[in-house]
Amino acid sequence: MITSILETIGNTPLITIPNSNKANEGQVLFKYERYNPGGSIKDRAAIYIIEEAEKRGLLKPGGTLIESSSGNFGISLAMIGAAKGYHVIVLVDPKTTSANLALLKCFGAEVIVVTEQDDCGSYHKTRISLANKLAKEIKNSFRPDQCFNLLNSEAHYKSTAKEIMDNCPKKLTTFITAVSTGGQLGGISKYLKTFAPEVQIIGVDAEGSVIFGGNADSYRIPGIGLGWTPVNLNMEYIDCAYKISDEQAFITARAFARNEGILMGPSSGACALVALKVAQHLTPEDRIVCMISDGGERYIQTLFNDEWMEQQGFVTKVDREAIRTMAQQLQPWSRHPAASANYRTDLMDSLEVPDSTIQLNSEVRN
Ligand SMILES: Cc1ncc(COP(=O)(O)O)c(C=O)c1O
């Protein structure tokens, strides 16, 4: 018997994609994170950070969790807060979909919409600074702080990465995932470079994000990208980086629903496209694990809505071969991402990162 919904986090399946992946190519395995109870990979980092904070006395019964999140991490915290009896405040922005807002509210979270853009044209910095300010004002509160808290990547080092190594049939050749806070890419790349250094690590970002360098611009892929290189990501572990356009990400995600019966969000569409590209250059003995960070239901009104797609100027129908050709034509953004890292140590001060994060980080580093 399972005594709490929270015990069902993790142990997600690896799934083949036989209708999209040819038998003479490398075999793509999707690590399908939709099966987490909060519907995304973010459940893993959220439960790990909350339980570590409880153990270390930073989070007390009846406390308030305050977080900046445009979607998945906030939903995970809202679910965990409901199960454990914490009040949850989530700072979102105007890009947050109505489906995500509804999910946050259905778990009882309080939602604050931050409308002021930061100097990168996104809302990350303004959301984070307001969350930090509220955490100072609200008694018995705790900031999980997914952007600056190193427990985020440690969660994936300890759970997601180990699951991949334990469950992937021989031989794992390539690992692919999307990046925003760097939690998943940072934690999993560290684990693989330690225990299986031969595995090629590929990071996937949005065109317009500057995690791997380049110029900042606006983009529509939710959950991906940042205006700087996150502290949770050690770029020395990353072998190659791709930047994917909004339209490529959205139409690939739609194609996988039609061609494989697999629902996924746009960030996973971006990763899946890179996986199809990599597979075309490998042999059937090679395995490519590609993270599918969430499912598609939370994008019903955008990604899976023809009218919305047309309003963005995106095509709505693309056949299987066209997706394979699009994948073939992709070119890496960088084959040595560490050279264009964009770390911003000054942000810890200017955004007033909470003392609890600084304390946790010093314990994680030691
Ligand atoms: C759907 C989705 N994909 C990818 C990511 C990126 O993961 P990370 O923040 O661990 O880098 C996120 C993060 O919010 C996400 O929600």
Image (cartoon, grey):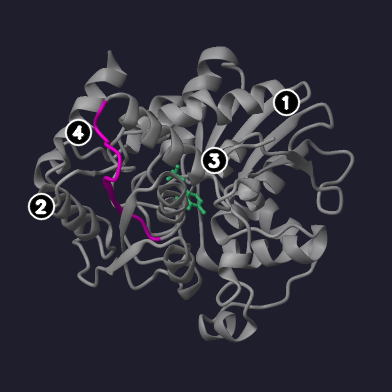
- Distance from disc 4 to disc 1, alpha carbons, whole Å, reads 35 Å
Q: Earlier in the sequence, mark 2 or mark 3?
A: 3
- Distance from disc 4 to disc 2, alpha carbons, whole Å, reads 14 Å
- Distance from disc 4 to disc 3, alpha carbons, whole Å, reads 24 Å
Q: Earlier in the sequence, mark 4 or mark 2?
A: 2
- Distance from disc 1 to disc 2, alpha carbons, whole Å, reads 45 Å
Q: From which residue to which does the magenta span run?
A: 57-70
Do residues under tags 3 and 1 come within 8 Å of each other at their CB atoms?
no
Q: Amino acid at mark 4?
A: Ser
Q: Which residue is mark 2?
A: 137
Image vertical order of residue 113 relative to residue 147, above or below: below
Left or right of 361 in this view: 224: right
Do residues under tags 4 and 2 come within 8 Å of each other at their CB atoms?
no
Ligand 1 is within 8 Å of the C-beta of the residue at disc 3: no
Q: Amino acid at mark 1?
A: Asn
Mark 2, residues whose alpha carbon is within 10 Å: few (<14), some, or many (≥20)? few
Q: Callout 4: helix, strand or loop?
A: helix
Q: Quadrant of the C terminus?
A: top left
The secondary structure that most of the magenta stretch takes on is loop
Near-viewer residue (99 or 150): 99
What label sits on residue 167 in the rendered view?
1
- The residue depicted at 65 percent of the width and 22 percent of the height is 165
Left or right of 307 in this view: 236: left
Q: Earlier in the sequence, mark 4 or mark 3?
A: 3
Q: Amino acid at mark 3?
A: Leu
Q: Amino acid at mark 2?
A: Glu
What label sits on residue 6 in the rendered view?
3
Left or right of 136 in this view: 177: right
Q: Earlier in the sequence, mark 3 or mark 1?
A: 3
Q: Earlier in the sequence, mark 4 or mark 1?
A: 1
Image vertical order of residue 21 relative to residue 235, above or below: below
